[in-house]
Image: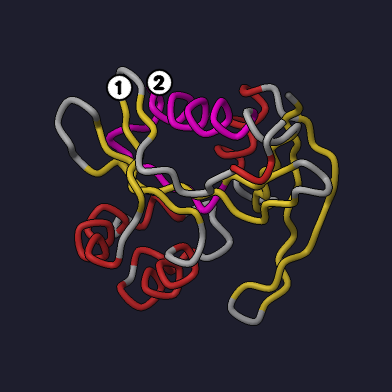
């Protein structure tokens, strides 16, 4: 394994239905437009991300990660965003998260296709991928279980000054 060559933000990852490109500051307005649906954030611990202020807080966090703009490969429409984070070469793992997808793309092959791109890329460099999901985010929990991940831990993260329960899932190579 060539851990030292793991680029958390390659120029692009793509398959037949989706492509991921590095997230940039210039994407803020268009991504906020996609994120401004309150139902996207209904099960997320930070439910205010549909507001400009709430989304700006989220964007400021993800722009410092290995984040991607998710695009529909056929139309170039913004589907959402996702990120690599907390890369740990000693433990040979990386997190995938800070993900949202617009409702237009819910229930189809899109989330799985996006995660598969990232997982396949990550497994060239690490032995496991971690997902941290809010305890009330049942949609995301089901989605990572469908990928084959297993719940390995219960954690607490502080979000907007409030301690929030999270579950940690792991997908092994």
**Magenta span:** 97-123
Q: Quadrant of the C terminus?
A: top right
Q: Position of residue 104 (x, y in %)?
A: 27, 35
- Mark toward the viewer: 1 or 2: 1
User: Is-magenta flag for residue 149?
Assistant: no
Q: Is 101 above or below relative to 34?
A: above
Disc number at residue 17? 1
- The residue at 83%/51% (across/down) is 154
- Identified at 14% across, 31% down, the residue is 75
The residue at 67%/27% (across/down) is 145
Query: Is residue 118 shown above or below 95?
Result: above
* Residue situated in front as seen by the camera: 167 or 123: 123
Secondary structure beneath label 1: loop
Q: Earlier in the sequence, mark 1 or mark 2?
A: 1
Give the Cα distance between marks 1 and 2. 9 Å
Residue density around tag 1, few if under 14, some if 14–19, many if 20 or more, within 10 Å: some
- Between 4 and 124, which is closer to the camera in this rendering? 4
Query: Seen in the image, is 116 located left or right of residue 100?
Result: right
Q: Position of residue 151 (x, y in %)?
A: 79, 37
Tell me the residue that label 2 is attached to: 109
Indicate whether residue 102 is drawn in magenta: yes
Residue at the outermost bottom position: 161
Q: In the rendered image of this protein, does residue 101 appear above or below residue 117?
A: below
How are the colours assigned in the image?
secondary structure
Tags 1 and 2 touching, CB below 8 Å: yes
Examine the image and state in which quarter residue 35 appears: bottom left
The kind of secondary structure element at disc 2 is loop
**Relative image position of residue 63 (x, y in whole percent):** 42, 65
| Residue at figure coordinates x 27%, y 38% from the top left | 71
| Badge number at residue 39 | none
Quarter of the rendering occupied by the N terminus: top right
Mark 2 residue crowding within 10 angstroms, few (<14) / some (14–19) / many (20+)? few
């Amino acid at each position: 394994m060539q851990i030292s060559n793991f680029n958390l933000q390659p120029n692009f990852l793509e398959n037949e239905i989706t492509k991921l490109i590095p997230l940039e500051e210039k994407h803020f307005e268009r991504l906020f437009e996609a994120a401004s649906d309150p139902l996207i954030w209904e099960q997320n611990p930070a439910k205010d991300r549909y507001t400009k202020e709430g989304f700006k807080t989220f964007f400021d966090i993800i722009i410092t990660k290995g984040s991607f703009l998710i695009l529909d490969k056929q139309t170039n429409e913004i589907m959402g965003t996702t990120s690599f984070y907390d890369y740990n070469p000693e433990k040979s793992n990386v997190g995938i998260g800070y993900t949202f997808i617009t409702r237009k793309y819910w229930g189809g092959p899109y989330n799985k296709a996006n995660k598969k791109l990232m997982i396949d890329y990550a497994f060239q460099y690490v032995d496991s991928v971690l997902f941290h999901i809010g305890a009330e985010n049942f949609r995301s929990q089901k989605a990572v279980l469908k990928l084959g991940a297993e719940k390995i831990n219960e954690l607490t993260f502080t979000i907007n000054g409030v301690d929030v329960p999270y579950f940690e899932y792991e997908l092994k190579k």
